[in-house]
Image (cartoon, rainbow, N blue to C red):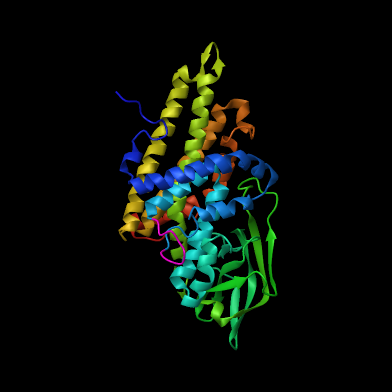
Amino acid sequence: MRSLDALDLLDVQSLLSDEERLVQDTVQRFVNGKVLPIIRECFEEHRFPEELIPEIASLGLLGNTLEGYECAGLSSVCAGLVYQELERGDSALRSFVSVQSSLAMYPIFTFGSEAQKERWLPAMARGEAIGCFGLTESHGGSDPGNMKTHAKQDGDDWILNGSKMWITSGSIADVAVIWAMTGDGIRGFLVEREMPGFAATEIENKFSLRASSTAALFFDNVRVPNHNVLPDALGLSAPLNCLNQARIGIAWGPIGSAQACLHEVLEFTRTREAFGRPLNHTQTIQLRLADMARRISTAQLLAVHLSRLQDQGKLHPTQISLAKWNNVRMALDIARDCRDMLGASGISAEYCSIRHMLNMESIITYEGTETIHQLVVGKELTGISAF
């Protein structure tokens, strides 16, 4: 009988179209050739590899599912495979592309005026303009409705005051999609880097997502012209819509992290000997490896199925919550177990498991904590909100 791929026991590859496999192979080569050789150093130096942005853009990865405006118009499965391969390199790369595509370009595409789309989307697709998404506030966390950042109309302008926290790409962004409370409810504003009163400060001393640019944003009487307001975005449902676009990508990305950790520990346990035999000859190691393969395979099937539903317009927000919860928990548990199986070597940056493990501690928190997604599923099951 033929041997199975250790990282794809259920042969999910056979479910993919030729186009989907081509997209995956292309990004896989980019990650192997350009990301993996430098990412450990970037993580150690707390540096986002901005030098990779032009090639990321040239591959059509920015705004990847959008149609027109120089965007690739990929299917949801293609986009998911992009995120899986990028996160196999590091969560920082997937986070950057996800924020640029789903949280910065998508709201402009969905809620923006034609002038806003023409101005920003082609430049963002080419990587010539970087965007970020400002919803989270330091006191709010999982309760974005408790928003303190506010905007008041002043003639043809809006005066914006407040702050945002934990903003990916915030310190390198040319435009920030900022959500603020107004007299009519929450609205979206395009705040440009050079606007007086707008400041972005890089958050230092992170022990997770160290290769990602993460900032705090501050708005001190920032004057935003009315033509920088997203005309079709009103209410909390608008930013939550954007988050759902990003979360399906987060369901894919951690699969890549888990695959990287499993690949590493398979080789380690094959060559490392203890008590006169290789580690992978023992039942305890094989049981743990088998459990990792089971969880990765089921996560892959879940991601493919939900992305197919998304392309058919049938995906439900609760299904996204289930996938984000399941797949990130899967990757975090596997990274932790791989770190343990590596023994003392597991805490060394020479191996990727500790880096992926630390990154997953952030991924399981952002864009909805594990508890929040569990409660979303619980509400669906019972019809009762326990928030």
The residue under the point 46% across, 22% down is: 284
The residue under the point 50% across, 21% down is: 270
Between 225 and 372, the residue placed more toward the observer is: 225
Is 331 rendered above or below residue 138?
above
Q: In which quadrant will I find the N terminus?
A: top left
Confirm whether residue 366 shows in the render: no
Residue 326 horizontal/vertical position (percent): 42, 45
Total numbered badges shown on the rendered structure: 0
Residue at the top extreme, as displayed: 276
Residue 338 horizontal/vertical position (percent): 53, 32
Left or right relative to 356: residue 22: left
Residue 267 horizontal/vertical position (percent): 51, 25
Residue at the bottom extreme, as displayed: 155
The residue stretch that appears in magenta: 67-74
Between 38 and 167, the residue placed more toward the observer is: 38
Our reading of the magenta stretch's main secondary structure is loop
Confirm whether residue 179 shows in the render: yes
Residue 122 belongs to magenta span:
no
Between 77 and 35, the residue placed more toward the observer is: 35
The residue under the point 59% across, 67% down is: 176
Is 134 rendered above or below residue 360?
below
The residue under the point 40% across, 59% down is: 73
Residue 42 horizontal/vertical position (percent): 65, 44
Indicate the quadrant where residue 297 lies: top left
Indicate the quadrant where residue 228 lies: bottom right
Is 153 rendered above or below residue 206?
below
